[in-house]
Image (spheres, rainbow, N blue to C red):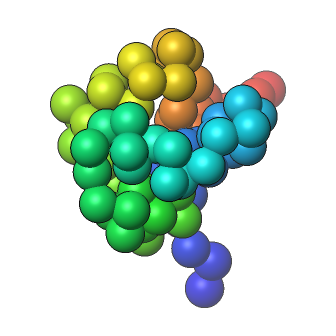
Amino acid sequence: MDKKVYNRIKAVLAEQGKTNKWLAETLDRNINTVSKWSTNKMQPTVESLFEIADALQVDVRSLLISTKKDS
């Protein structure tokens, strides 16, 4: 069974050349928590998602997988 992917945190970090360690230090969070977010093993709270977007200077929507189906 395929694992469901909800966020794009790992992809956005890679696009910007940043690491989980950088994000953990920037947000003052545990590296294991950030790693779980990046691998979609755990999802950040809405508040944390906005903090992540702010740290990465992106629109919060770019951190989520779209549910809109292309027609």
The location of residue 8, given as percent across then percent down, is 59, 43
Frontmost residue, 20 versus 62: 20
Residue 34 in view here: yes
The location of residue 23, given as percent across then percent down, is 46, 42
Frontmost residue, 54 versus 60: 54
Q: Is residue 21 above or below residue 7?
A: below
> For the C terminus, which image quadrant?
top right
> For the N terminus, which image quadrant?
bottom right
State the count of labels: 0
Instruction: Report the residue that reaches farthest toward the bottom.
Output: 1
- Image-based side of 25 in relation to 9, left or right: left
Image quarter for residue 34?
A: bottom left
Q: Is residue 57 above or below residue 41?
A: above
Q: Residue at left 27%, top 51%?
A: 29
Residue 49 in view here: no
The location of residue 53, given as percent across then percent down, is 44, 24
Q: Residue at left 34%, top 55%?
A: 43
- Image-based side of 40 in relation to 11, left or right: left
Q: Residue at left 52%, top 14%?
A: 57
